Every structure is written in structure tokens, then in C-alpha cells.
């Protein structure tokens, strides 16, 4: 974990592998020597006795002893979970990292029977996650996967009531999980409209979602994922612009010819090639359209091209840009210009930027923050202004001069033709 | 990946320098166009005028020129210039072929032809040396120079000589050269287009604007008195013609470009010959830049300063700017640098190309038959092919002159069978 600059860590399936319970005694672990000794020390008998017919502890004859074994397994699991959470918590503190710890649990609220079979204590696990500031990720069992995607809306209601410290995520499995012959599914993997609906319902409660796939998301489905995530937003025409209402940050695709972008009447700089970032709330986006941008001074401004967190507001700063954001993890922000100085909540911020195809990525800290990015010194601004003006003037001159020469050529050509005609 | 203000500045500087040259070139092209119309009217006036011609000595250096020399002499003798005022001194510069035999035969046939045989042991010291020797052998008022492969048109000498009667301030007058073998291959087509555009843009444009031009190696007349005043040809120079031009300008005289005084000559037909010739020219021009740049401020003719600066710009600044811009382009292509400065640079490149093509095509239209579709297509292709050899020529010359320190030796350009 220390070797690389991770965004976070996700622990899944920290349970015993016995989903069939006592029907499969061979899977009802743990039966190693340590576990047996510990259990015997706590409860006064060897847990193997639970599965020996004729024993006084045989599970069918002594259900209270089976409950003891269930309780022991849950305790082992909870202790292990705490060890892991503690370890990552320590790591975060010692390395000053913003690592997010995510724990995947089966939906214990709707399927409490799984707690006994798999050996996890749902409420104790959630308590540990709250204590160690970890994120809960909920996975529904395979028995649910053939149901309508709207099941995630009901799941959301159940988990909203839990009052978790950090927003939870629903884990959507995109695997060949459907039995096509029995349930009437056209495809084994969720795809198309089902995929859209899964994203829509699973992301609705908190704006976050987890997609689990093993390179199994269909190529064409990647295109529809953002639309599923943004399905709570509404957009309608208003005058020359659009009125957008959204509970989460969304991107409105206005087309590459959209320019002079304004949000609620103010110049707006969070956009890339006509795709505009809209903060949560109700806003009016206005702009003008032009096929060719002559003397495009917007190139001199700093733009936020993309961000991984929630965009709350933004304004132009002198030779830079100010952005207010919120993010559970560290927030990746892509600017179209190389930052010169960065201030977070008014304090100078040490950063390193990554150059990508479109711009420069800065990793901002998690939480609710105000970031001010200064991208240009006075000299650089002068250089950029000179570049824009001189290149534009060169184009004007080039067009005028080559046009003049072409005209003279045409006149020469016509004059020669006329002379030839008159002489013949 | 490297990015930052220094790279931005390098890029901007190279764009600015390239475009300074392009703007200057455009101004010359426009002036050249105006002069082409003016000179057509001037030619018409001269064709109706009877002039008293001065006595003229034609100097022709010849080193192993058996393939071409007889035709050249006969073409000159077929000139409309009064033969009684014409003397042809052919300097046989230690030839080992049949040049001497041909010249002696011609001398027997025509009394105006005067062969001078430089023994093999004394020959091969360069064109400037031969011309200086020839200069001592003549007492004529005017001196004309022709290369041994030239075929001047009948009235070329008439038009050139007439300029001195029209312009007393004139030190020299040069005519236009055309490419005999222009249809031989793609290279000669390119050279033909280059030659015509150079003459109509650079020579005609400068004469129109600044009353100056650069003497080529052939087809020009210079007053003998001016030659005597400036001390003849510089034997150290590889481009003795351009060097002489600068000294004539420095002495305060004008040099006029006369586009209707035409001669035809051969141009290199292979890339190797072309490259050697151009490298020699480039080295010669390095020499004259070093020779003259200190004297710019004291020269009588202030246009000399511009002329030397133009050479410097063409050989150093322009090439450096082109190389810088090409280097930045290639590094950017491989993702090693990033230049995030705003501006319509794709359009800048496109209009540079349009300007290049339109300038040359307009100039080609000044010559009957040269603005053909094939020549226009060649012009469009030249930008990406022939023109890209220019930095290589300059780099090779720079290496030979400054890094390797190779001795400057004059070499005759190889002739080709017609």
C-alpha cells in the first residue's frame, strides 16, 4: 500500500465461504487448531462436535450450541475487520494520505440469514466502519440479480435510514449472472436499458456507485453510463439557453460550437469543447453558437475541464480560476493550463501536476474546499496575449496578401486570354 | 514532458522570424509584379528606339567546355548587337578536352573571337581569377560576362547595354536566365520554378523598391571603370558575382535587373550536382556576409545594409527559425514537449503555404507557358520537397565552412548532354 499512490482500498468478501449454512458442513469453517482451541476455551466443547451425529452438541439436536458457533464466527470476522480497518487508519495517519477505505458487505438488512451462514455481524461491522471512517459498499446476493433494477431504490431507502457517517455505495455486478432460459433475460450480462436502469437506481441515493466487472462491461454500454448517473437531472429550454436542475454535478453537452458560456448570467469557465459542468441546484446556462471562433480570447482564460468530485461553484480569478468543490476522496481536477500557484482555502498548496492529452491534472485534497489556481504570471499572460494577437494578425495578413496575389494572377490570366482572342 | 515559458518564447520567436521573412518576401513579390508590368512597357519603348551602343567586351571563362562552348559563341555572334563593337574573349582555363581546338577554329572563322589559352599548370584557380586575367586584356568601355553554357537571346546584349544610356548612375545591369533543360526531370522543373520566382520576386522586387539587384554569374554588363574602381573580382570568393555586387553597391552605384534581356542555361540534372552547387553558393555567401557586415554603416549605398542583413537572415536566422520550429513540431509529435500558447497556428501554417504558392504562381504567370497546371502542381509540391532541402544545404555548408574548415575551392558545375 505504501509502494504506490493509491486513491483508496476496497475490501470485499471478508466472510466465511459457507452460503449454504449447515447443509454444507465441510464449508462451515473455521476448524483449524487455533480456532477449535479458542472456541473450546470460550464455550467448553470442540466445534467439530456440532457436525457429529450422536454427539450431545450435534447441531440438529442442540441448536443453542450452533448459535454459539455462529456467534463465534461473527466475532472472529469482526475482529479481523477491525484489525484491517485499524491498519489502514494508521497508514493514513502515518503517510498523511487521503486513502479511502471501502468495505463491501452483503445486504444484511434485507438478508439477515446471510450473517449466520457467512459469519459476519452486519451492525457491528457498520459500527466499525463509522469508527474508522470507512465507506460501506453494499452488494446484493445472487438471488436478487434477476429482479428489476428498481430494487436498488428500495435498498437505498433501507440504508438511508442507517445514518452512516460516510455516504454508502451500491455494488452493481456486471457479470454473466442472468439465467437466460429461466428468467427471460435476452442476455446473460446486464446491458443496454437494464444497464442504464441499474446505474440510475443504484447511484440515486448518494450519487456514488460501484460497478463490479471482470472486463465484462459491453463496449457500447460505457457510452450510456454517464447518462444513467445523471438521470436525476432535468434540462429544459429557456430563452436562448437551458434551465438545468440537478442534485449532483452533471455535464451538459451543448456542442463544440457553443461559446461565450454563462451560468446564471455570469461568465462560466468549467467546460471543455462545449461540454459544460453544472453544479448541483437549479441553473440557467446560456451561450452563443459560432462555426469558427475568430480571435478567440477565451483561450487566454483558465478553464476547469474536468473534476472527479462535486463542483459547487466557480469564478474567474486574476490570471486563474477559483473553484469550490466537495469530494470524499482526493479530487482530480483537470485544468487547460499549467498551474503556477495553487491556494486551498487561502493557504498555499504543494502539488504536482500530470500532463494529459487535454490539460494538466491536479490532485486536490478530499473534503469541502475552495481552490484558487493561478496559471499565469504577468509575463506569461503577455506572451499568450502576444501569441494570440500576432497569430491572428498573421492569418489576416496571410489571407489578404495571398488573396491579392491570387487576384493579380486571375487578372493576368484573363488579360492574356482577351489578348489571344482579339489577336485571333 | 517539457513545457514552460522558454519553449513558448522559442516557438513564438521562430514564428515571428519566419513571418518577418514571409512579409518581406510578399512585399518584394508585389513590387516584382509591378516591375514586370513596368519593364514590359520599357522593353516596348526600347524596341522603338535607336541607340548608339558602346564598345563591349564579352568575357567567357571556359574550363573543359567542349560540349557547349561552340554553341555559346555562335549564339553571341548571332546577337543584334553591332558586331563591330563586340569583342569575345574566351578564357580557356587549362582545359584538357577539345575546348582549345574549338576556340581556335572559331577564332579563324570570326575575327571578334579572341581565345586566351591559360596553360594547364596555371589554370583551375577559379572563375574570379580567370575574369581578372581577362579584364587586363581588354580596353573596351563595357564588360559583359557569360558562362560557357549560355545561349543568350539575340537582343539580350542590346537591352543590357541600353540601360547605361538610360541610367547614368548604373554600375551594372543584369538580365534574366532561363532554364534550357527545365523539362528534363522533376528536379530541373523545380529549379526552373525556383529560378523564375527568385528573379521575379527577389531581383525585380529589390530593383523596384531599392534600386539594387545581385549579379548572377552570367548575362550581365558592368562598366569597366566601375570594375577598375572596385578592384575587379575577389579571388577568395566562391560566389564572386554576389561579392562583386556588394562592392559595386558599396561604391554607391546601382545594379539594375533587366528581365527582358534573356539568356538560357543548363541547370543541374541530378541531386548530387545540385547539392554541391548550392553548398558552394551557401559557403560563398557565408564568406561575403563576414566580409561586409562590419562595413554596412560606412557604405555609400544604404541599401547595402539591407542586402547583407537579408543574406544573414536567409542563411542564419531564417534557417535557425525553420529548424527550431521543425524541432519543436517533432518533439511535440512524440509528446516530449508541450506548447500551450493560444492562437490559430494551423491557420498560420496554412496561410504561409497559400502565400508561398500564390507568390510563385503569380510570378510564373509573367512568363508565357510557365503558369501551366503541371508547374502549379510542382509549386504546390515544392513546399514539402525541394524547399525542405534548403536547411540541409545550409547545414552542410555551415559544417564545411566552420566545423570542418574545408578549403574553399571553386568548382565548375557539371554540364549535361542536351
Image (cartoon, coloured by chain):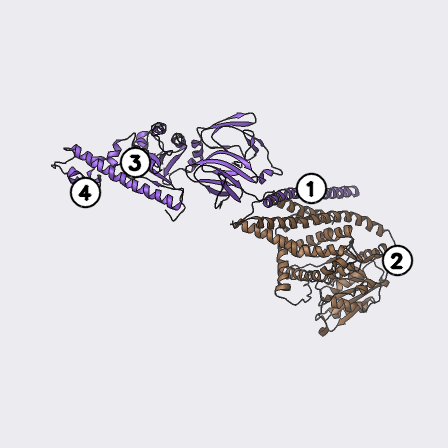
Chain colours: A purple, B brown
- Residue A224 in sight: yes
**Chain ID of residue with mark 2:** B
- Between disc 1 and disc 2, the foreground one is 1
Label 4, label 1: how many angstroms apart (C-alpha)?
A: 92 Å
**Chain ID of residue with mark 1:** A
Q: Which mark is residue A125?
A: 3
x, y (%) of residue B276? 65, 62
Which secondary structure lies at badge 3?
A: helix
x, y (%) of residue B152? 77, 58
- Between disc 2 and disc 4, the foreground one is 4
Q: Are marks 1 and 2 on the same chain?
A: no
Give the mark nearer the N terminus: 3 vs 4: 4
Q: Which residue is mark 4?
A: A36
Give the mark nearer the N terminus: 1 vs 3: 3
Q: Which residue is mark 2?
A: B52
Horizontal side of residue A390 vs A174, given as left or right: right
- Residue A276 in sight: no
Of A77 and B305, which appears nearest the observer? A77
Q: Are marks 4 and 1 on the same chain?
A: yes
Q: Which residue is mark 1?
A: A400
Amino acid at each position: 500500500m505504501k509502494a504506490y499512490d493509491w486513491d483508496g482500498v476496497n475490501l470485499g468478501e471478508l466472510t466465511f465461504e459457507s452460503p449454504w449454512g449447515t447443509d454444507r458442513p465441510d464449508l462451515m469453517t473455521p476448524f483449524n487448531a487455533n480456532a477449535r482451541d479458542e472456541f473450546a476455551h470460550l464455550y467448553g466443547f470442540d466445534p467439530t462436535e456440532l457436525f457429529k451425529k450422536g454427539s450431545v452438541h450435534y447441531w440438529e439436536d442442540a441448536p443453542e450450541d450452533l448459535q454459539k458457533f455462529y456467534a463465534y464466527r461473527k466475532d472472529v470476522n469482526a475482529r479481523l475487520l477491525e484489525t484491517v480497518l485499524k491498519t489502514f487508519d494508521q497508514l493514513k495517519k502515518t503517510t498523511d494520505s487521503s486513502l479511502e477505505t471501502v468495505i463491501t458487505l452483503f445486504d444484511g438488512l434485507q438478508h439477515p440469514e446471510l450473517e449466520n451462514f457467512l459469519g459476519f455481524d452486519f451492525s457491528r461491522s457498520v459500527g466499525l466502519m463509522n469508527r474508522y471512517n470507512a465507506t460501506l459498499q453494499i452488494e446484493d446476493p445472487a438471488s436478487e440479480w434477476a429482479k428489476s433494477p428498481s430494487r436498488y431504490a428500495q435498498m437505498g431507502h433501507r440504508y438511508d435510514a442507517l445514518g452512516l457517517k460516510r455516504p454508502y455505495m451500491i455494488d452493481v455486478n456486471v457479470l454473466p449472472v442472468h439465467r437466460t432460459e429461466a428468467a427471460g433475460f435476452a442476455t446473460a450480462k446486464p446491458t443496454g436499458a437494464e444497464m442504464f436502469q441499474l446505474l440510475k437506481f443504484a447511484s440515486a441515493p448518494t450519487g456514488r456507485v460501484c460497478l463490479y466487472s471482470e472486463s465484462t462491461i459491453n463496449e457500447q454500454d460505457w457510452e450510456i453510463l454517464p447518462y444513467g448517473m445523471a438521470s436525476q437531472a432535468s434540462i429544459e429550454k429557456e430563452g436562448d439557453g437551458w434551465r438545468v436542475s440537478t442534485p449532483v454535478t452533471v455535464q451538459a453537452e451543448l456542442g463544440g460550437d457553443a461559446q461565450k458560456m454563462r451560468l446564471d448570467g455570469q461568465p462560466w469557465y468549467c467546460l471543455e469543447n462545449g461540454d459544460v459542468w453544472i453544479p448541483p441546484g437549479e441553473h440557467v446556462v446560456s451561450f452563443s453558437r459560432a462555426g469558427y471562433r475568430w480571435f478567440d480570447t477565451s483561450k487566454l482564460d483558465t478553464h476547469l475541464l474536468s473534476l472527479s468530485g462535486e463542483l459547487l461553484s466557480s469564478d474567474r480569478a486574476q490570471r486563474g480560476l477559483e473553484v469550490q468543490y466537495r469530494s470524499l476522496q482526493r479530487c482530480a481536477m483537470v485544468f487547460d493550463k499549467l498551474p503556477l500557484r495553487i491556494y486551498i482555502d487561502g493557504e498555499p498548496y504543494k502539488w504536482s501536476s500530470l500532463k494529459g492529452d487535454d490539460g494538466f491534472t491536479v490532485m486536490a485534497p478530499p473534503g469541502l474546499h475552495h481552490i484558487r489556481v493561478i496559471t499565469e504570471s504577468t509575463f506569461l499572460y503577455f506572451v499568450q496575449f502576444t501569441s494570440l494577437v500576432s497569430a491572428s494578425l498573421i492569418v489576416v495578413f496571410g489571407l489578404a496578401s495571398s488573396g491579392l496575389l491570387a487576384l493579380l494572377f486571375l487578372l493576368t490570366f484573363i488579360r492574356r486570354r482577351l489578348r489571344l482572342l482579339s489577336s485571333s | 514532458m517539457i513545457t514552460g515559458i522558454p519553449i513558448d518564447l522559442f516557438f513564438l520567436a521562430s514564428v515571428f522570424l519566419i513571418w518577418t521573412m514571409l512579409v518581406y518576401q510578399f512585399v518584394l513579390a508585389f513590387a516584382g509584379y509591378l516591375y514586370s508590368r513596368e519593364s514590359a512597357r520599357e522593353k516596348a519603348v526600347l524596341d522603338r528606339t535607336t541607340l548608339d551602343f558602346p564598345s563591349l567586351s564579352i568575357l567567357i571563362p571556359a574550363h573543359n567546355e567542349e560540349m557547349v562552348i561552340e554553341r555559346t559563341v555562335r549564339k553571341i555572334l548571332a546577337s543584334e548587337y553591332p558586331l563591330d563593337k563586340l569583342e569575345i574573349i574566351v578564357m580557356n582555363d587549362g582545359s584538357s578536352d577539345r575546348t582549345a581546338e574549338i576556340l581556335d577554329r572559331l577564332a579563324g572563322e570570326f575575327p571578334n573571337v579572341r581565345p586566351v589559352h591559360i596553360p594547364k599548370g596555371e589554370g583551375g584557380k577559379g572563375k574570379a581569377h580567370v575574369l581578372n586575367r581577362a579584364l587586363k586584356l581588354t580596353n573596351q568601355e563595357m564588360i559583359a560576362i557569360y558562362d560557357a553554357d549560355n545561349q543568350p537571346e539575340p537582343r539580350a546584349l542590346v537591352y543590357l547595354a541600353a540601360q547605361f544610356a538610360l541610367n547614368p548612375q548604373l554600375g551594372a545591369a543584369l538580365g534574366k536566365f532561363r532554364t534550357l533543360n527545365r523539362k528534363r526531370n522533376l528536379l530541373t522543373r523545380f529549379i526552373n520554378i525556383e529560378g523564375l520566382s527568385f528573379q521575379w520576386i527577389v531581383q525585380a522586387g529589390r530593383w523596384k523598391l531599392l534600386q539594387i539587384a545581385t549579379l548572377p554569374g552570367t548575362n550581365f554588363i558592368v562598366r569597366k571603370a566601375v570594375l577598375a574602381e572596385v578592384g575587379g573580382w575577389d579571388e577568395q570568393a566562391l560566389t564572386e558575382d554576389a561579392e562583386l555586387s556588394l562592392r559595386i553597391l558599396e561604391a554607391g552605384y546601382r545594379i539594375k535587373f533587366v528581365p527582358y534581356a534573356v539568356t538560357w542555361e543548363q541547370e543541374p540534372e541530378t541531386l548530387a550536382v545540385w547539392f554541391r552547387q548550392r553548398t558552394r553558393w551557401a559557403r560563398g555567401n557565408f564568406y561575403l556576409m563576414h566580409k561586409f557586415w562590419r562595413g554596412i554603416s560606412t557604405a555609400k549605398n544604404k541599401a547595402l545594409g539591407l542586402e547583407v542583413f537579408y543574406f544573414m537572415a536567409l542563411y542564419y536566422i531564417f534557417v535557425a527559425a525553420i529548424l527550431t520550429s521543425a524541432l519543436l513540431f517533432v518533439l511535440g509529435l512524440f509528446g516530449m514537449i508541450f506548447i500551450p500558447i493560444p492562437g490559430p497556428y494551423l491557420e498560420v501554417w496554412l496561410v504561409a503555404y497559400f502565400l508561398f504558392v500564390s507568390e510563385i504562381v503569380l510570378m510564373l504567370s509573367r512568363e508565357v507557358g510557365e503558369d501551366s497546371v503541371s508547374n502549379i502542381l510542382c509549386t504546390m509540391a515544392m513546399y514539402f520537397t525541394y524547399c525542405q532541402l534548403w536547411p540541409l544545404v545550409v547545414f552542410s555548408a555551415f559544417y564545411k565552412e566552420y566545423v570542418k574548415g574545408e578549403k574553399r575551392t571553386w568548382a565548375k558545375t557539371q554540364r549535361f548532354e542536351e
